[in-house]
Amino acid sequence: MVRIIPADPTLILSYSLLFLSSFVTSQSSWSKLSDSGLKKLPSPGDTLNPDVGKLLKPLLIPRVVNTEGSRKALQHFTNFFADLKWSLNYDNFSQPTVLSSDPVPFANFWATLDPPWKAKENREGEIGRLVLVAHYDSKIEPAGFIGATDSAAPCAMIMHIAKAIDKAMRRKWEKMEKDGDEFEMADEQGLMVLLLDGEEAFKFWTHEDSVYGARHLAEKWDTTMNAAQSTFKTQLSSINLFVLLDLLGAPMPRVPSYFKTTHWAYQHMADLEIRLRALGLLESGKDHALFLPDRDKTVFMEGLMIEDDHIPFLRRGVDILHLIASPFPHVWHTMDDDAQHLDKQVVNDWAVIVSAFVAEWYGLEPFLADNGDGMSTISKRGNKTEL
Ligand SMILES: [Zn+2]
């Protein structure tokens, strides 16, 4: 990642058109977590520790497209989501790059957890989803570049989030099936984790030399029609919100609210951060500067945009929540973007804040376990480390 570009004026128009529909469909049914619900959120424990963490450590290797490191990362995702019994999908494709006319193989990966009554009947056109996204490839230069914030840590955070809500989602769906309310069942959404390949430029960032995986998949999903009469005509249109995590894990992050159309979602997340912090449930502490400082923002600059994996989706009308630090981490695109320069507390806190957002999105409060489903809860974590 990344570069700043002037905004496309046609996008500004589509923002205002899209605003109304997001407001009606997603905001009206929002279920806030209570304080006791927040305390039950599973803690990442040491799974995101750069030195020993079983989710993060395997990703802290060079992951250049079509190399052994990239394949190891993909295997890591495959093993993890197969264990969770999610549905796994791969988008393998080859295309020439700026380096040569020889096609290079790329591999996007996604895993889905869907309401069983929709998954069973393979009703793809009926499943709207929240989509959590990061890129897993690393930059080809400098040689040996790790990309800990870019985006090994975001990938591992998303893995934690998936695990943190998996059992609660399943309990919710069991209850829904038992209750048998057809309207609620028809409305119920799935969750997708999307890990993209080929985000980085091989040479210099241009439209042609960047976001290879995202460009390929956005076009494919935009042109893949679901069955006739489906609620969602294409796979792309079934994305309710595309939450992109990038350049996270460095100290003192500041993530602005970039889009007026999805500011309502940003506000929910920012609110959660404020509440989690006040309750002493974040490792970076009660007095740390807010990671998400823009809750009360009212004026949006439409002139500048950060280029990243969301662009091919944004241009096709998908709602985006872009969680990218601005300014970028000091270590950005240098050899220092490695394990040592990650801030462990910040990494864990991001995973918890986004978990809380997902738990609210799906209304999981009644289904969160007291014991963190085998992970410790963030309130227990607090007792252990802060005394
Ligand atoms: Zn990058």
Image (cartoon, grey):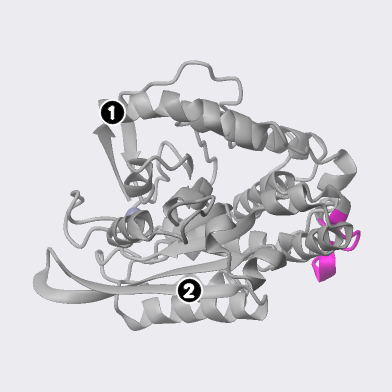
Rendered position, 156 above or below 256:
below
What label sits on residue 10 in the rendered view?
1
**Is residue 230 inside the magenta stretch?**
no
Residue drawn where x is 49% and y is 47% of the image? 242
Q: Which residues are magenta?
A: 367-377
Residue 132: image x %, image y %? 54, 54
Residue 260: image x %, image y %? 48, 26
Residues 305 and 286: in front is 305
Residue 94: image x %, image y %? 23, 74
Q: Which residue is mark 2?
A: 89
Mark 2 to mark 1 CA distance (whole Å): 33 Å
- Which amino acid does the dot numbered 1 rest on? Thr
Residue contact at pointers 2 and 1, CB within 8 angstroms: no
Query: Considering only order in the chain, which callout, 1 or 2, is on the residue closer to the N terminus?
Result: 1
Q: Locate residue 117: give its quadrant.
A: bottom right
Task: Classify 10 Å Cα crowding around label 1: few (below 14), some (14-19), many (20 and above).
Answer: few
Q: For mark 1, give the secondary structure.
A: helix
Mark 2 residue's CB less than 8 Å from ligand 1: no
Q: Locate residue 372: give its quadrant.
A: bottom right
**Is residue 368 inside the magenta stretch?**
yes
Ligand 1 in which quarter: bottom left
- Which amino acid does the dot numbered 2 rest on? Asn
